[in-house]
């Protein structure tokens, strides 16, 4: 079909945004809501990775409770924000991080030694960099 703009597109074509990374989207949404001072945010679609990531964030007190909403599709998550979240995002592409190099990554990625966490996906599940160090495992940042 010939090139077109705006309104005429919606009735003729079936362009659909393809979501590359649901985790990146979820973290961006979370970060934006926190910046705007929201108390609650809705993340969709949901996934096991997103839920596990939220559990790690909750464990460290960056977010409050969260609730899974089953809409018979990809699912949604309602997250209570507590105002402690400064910034969160994904490292893309997902680099392999060896056990010995975790410290190097932490120094490069985090603003200071006192606060912040790198979350890794490992063969033993999704965990923060300190837990990965304790369990002597590497993974993907």
Image (tube, rainbow, N blue to C red):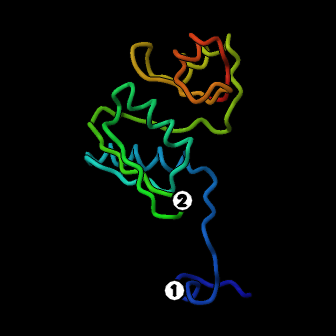
User: Is 40 displayed left or right of 125 in the figure?
Assistant: left
**Neighbourhood count class around disc 2 (C-alpha, 10 Å): few under 14, some 14–19, many 20 upward:** few
Residue 36 or residue 57, whichever sits in front: 57
Residue 18 numbered mark, or none: none
Residue 117 in picture, x, y percent from top left: 47, 23
**Neighbourhood count class around disc 1 (C-alpha, 10 Å): few under 14, some 14–19, many 20 upward:** few
- Which residue is the site of mark 1? 7
Q: Give the mark, 1 or 2, whose residue is nearer the N terminus.
A: 1
Residue 36 in picture, x, y percent from top left: 29, 48
> Which quadrant does the C terminus fall into?
top right
Q: Nearer the viewer, mark 1 or mark 2?
A: 2
> Which quadrant does the N terminus fall into?
bottom right
User: In the rendered picture of this protein, how many numbered marks are placed on residues?
Assistant: 2
- Which residue is the site of mark 2? 74
Q: Residue furthest right?
A: 1
User: Is 26 displayed left or right of 2 in the figure?
Assistant: left
Determine the secondary structure under disc 2: loop
Specify the quadrant of the image occupied by residue 48.
top right
Specify the quadrant of the image occupied by residue 119.
top right
Q: Residue at x 44, y 37 (%)?
A: 54
Determine the secondary structure under disc 1: helix
Q: Is residue 117 above or below residue 1?
A: above
């Amino acid at each position: 079909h010939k090139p077109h703009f705006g309104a005429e597109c919606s009735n003729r074509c079936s362009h659909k945004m393809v979501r590359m990374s649901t985790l990146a989207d979820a973290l961006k949404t979370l970060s934006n809501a926190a910046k705007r001072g929201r108390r609650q945010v809705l993340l969709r679609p949901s996934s096991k990775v997103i839920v596990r990531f939220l559990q790690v964030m909750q464990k460290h007190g960056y977010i409050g409770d969260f609730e899974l909403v089953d809409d018979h599709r990809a699912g949604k998550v309602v997250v209570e924000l507590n105002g402690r979240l400064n910034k969160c995002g994904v490292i893309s592409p997902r680099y392999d991080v060896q056990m010995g190099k975790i410290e190097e990554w932490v120094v490069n990625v985090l603003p200071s030694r006192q606060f912040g966490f790198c979350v890794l996906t490992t063969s033993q599940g999704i965990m923060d960099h300190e837990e990965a160090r304790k369990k002597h495992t590497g993974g993907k940042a």
